[in-house]
Image (cartoon, grey):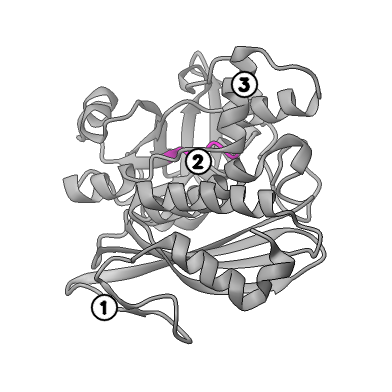
Amino acid sequence: MNLRELGEFGLIEAIRRRAGASHPQWRVAIGDDAALLTPKPGEELVFTADTVVENVHFRWRTTDPKSLGRKALAVNLSDVGAMGARPLGFLLTLGLPRSVSGKTLDGFLSGLLACARAARCPLVGGDVTRAGEFSAAITAIGAVTRGRALLRSAARPGDRVLVTGRLGAAAAGLRALERRKRLTSAELALAKRQRAPSPPFRAGPALVRLGLSRCAIDVSDGLVRDLSHILDESRVGARLALESVPVAKGATLDDALGGGEDYELLFTVGPRAPSAAVIGNRLACRVTELGVITRQRRLILTRAGRPVAPIARGYEHFKASSARSDK
């Protein structure tokens, strides 16, 4: 794929051919000024957007084009799933420097479209433009039963706090990548979690379908910061047991609490909901119970039942943070 030979419209046509046909729910996809979607009766549409920018969200020395393409869509699927929605399709805007190689562009599209096919989330439109550095902006669309979306503002005192998977692998993987030396097999596994995450984006819709939850968020900026988003929006507090946090092998508790980019699902259930083990079986993924929502509007971290000092809250753009991340 030679960008100089293809030009803008040749590139668009090449992407269109590789993307293939979209779901019949999309009456018009790539080829017109805009896409046309026919929503199903009784559903609400969910929209989310995320951007990856060279030297801000990623560096070529710590990733590869195929992994970047997968990650660019995966983080959007994570947001859609965290709302309890199933993915319907996505728009892609590519910013490309003149110097971008055909190998880089081909690898990026391969990873992106492989992820799209696996998630049944077709590419339905977008834009391409010349830019100083490589960037990819994605807008993903999903659908959820009307009135059933999982919201950050829906946690209530007495609810239990749970999370899928294990945390901290992405932060530990980035640390290993930045050392610039040959990685062990264990470090390669951590690096994969950083470069090409696989969010449990089907867990959110399953929670909606099973009627188990009304509140969720994906863990993108670190467990403490993302839980704090729920507490702020719901105007509640929480007690979280540090010994219960599921730390990924090779990561630290600090990685799990503030590292970010794990893209696991953090959610609440009612006090009488099934155990974490039962919920995990129903969601087909590991689920761990972390603590409880309280009326007191602050987050209390405990160890062996005793409060401990606050820790770093996680990543935030434009603000100094002790957490290190590719974000």
Indicate the quadrant where residue 8 lies.
bottom right
Mark toward the start of the polypeptide (1 vs 3): 1
Q: Say which residue label 3 marks.
A: 188
Q: Say which residue label 2 marks.
A: 263
Question: Where residue 181 appears, x then y in whole percent?
Answer: 79, 19
Q: CA distance from mark 1 to mark 3?
A: 43 Å
Q: Is residue 304 above or below residue 221?
A: above
Under circle 2, the secondary element is loop
Q: Which residues are magenta?
A: 261-265
Mark toward the start of the polypeptide (1 vs 2): 1
Sort mark 1 into few (<14), some (14-19) or many (20+) by Cα contacts within 10 Å.
few
Indicate the quadrant containing the N terminus: top left, top right, bottom left or bottom right.
bottom right
Judge left or right: residue 320 versus residue 39. right
Q: CA distance from mark 3 to mark 2?
A: 18 Å
Indicate the quadrant where residue 311 lies.
top right
Q: Is residue 262 magenta?
A: yes
Question: Where residue 312 appears, x then y in whole percent?
Answer: 70, 35
Of 301 and 4, the residue lying toward us: 4
Judge left or right: residue 98 versus residue 158. right
Q: Say which residue label 1 marks.
A: 38
Q: Amino acid at mark 2?
A: Tyr
Q: Amino acid at mark 1?
A: Thr
Does residue 221 appear in this view?
Answer: no
Residue at 39% over, 64% down: 89
Sort mark 3 into few (<14), some (14-19) or many (20+) by Cα contacts within 10 Å.
some
